[in-house]
Image: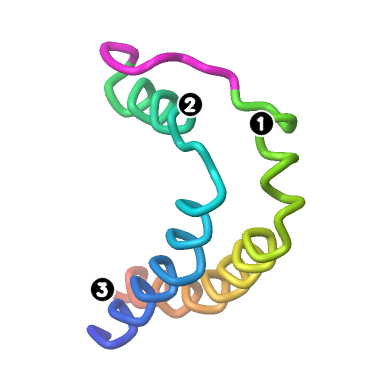
């Protein structure tokens, strides 16, 4: 299981983080996430609509990496969910 977790983390770092950090200004995204996680005490309650993401999804590398991550996570999440249910 540990090797699966390591592989899962590696996929996130390689497929999402690198391409996302290279292509996207994360300021608004981080402000929204911070606000959500701190129940409005920090960050900003910014609406992130389709327009915010549209330009980034035109970046072929970022879009394809995102799609591959969804595919890999869906494949990996089922066994992890089953293990959680069994424990």
- Residue picked out by circle 2: 28
- What residue is shown at x 28% (from left), y 15% (from top)? 42
Magenta segment: 40-47
Residues at marks 1 and 2 touching, judged by CB atoms closer than 8 Å: yes
Q: Is the residue marked by circle 3 packed among few (<14), some (14-19), or many (20+) residues within 10 Å?
A: few
- Residue picked out by circle 1: 52
Q: Which mark is residue 87?
A: 3
The front one of 80 and 50 is 50
Kindly report the secondary structure that dominates the magenta region of the rendered protein. loop
Quadrant in which the N terminus is drawn: bottom left
Q: Which of the two discs, 3 and 1, labels the residue nearer the N terminus?
A: 1
Q: Label 3, label 1: how many angstroms apart (C-alpha)? A: 41 Å
79 in relation to 25, above or below:
below
Residue 12: where, in percent of width, then height?
A: 42, 66
Q: Is residue 41 left or right of residue 23?
A: left
Q: Which of the two discs, 3 and 2, labels the residue nearer the N terminus?
A: 2
């Amino acid at each position: 299981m540990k090797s699966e977790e390591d592989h899962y983390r590696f996929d996130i770092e390689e497929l999402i983080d690198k391409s996302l950090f290279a292509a996207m200004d994360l300021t608004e995204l981080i402000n929204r996430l911070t606000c959500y996680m701190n129940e409005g005490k920090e960050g900003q309650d910014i609406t992130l609509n389709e327009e915010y993401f549209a330009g980034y999804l035109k970046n072929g590398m970022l879009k394809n990496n995102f799609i591959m991550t969804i595919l890999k996570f869906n494949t990996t999440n089922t066994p992890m969910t089953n293990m959680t249910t069994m424990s």
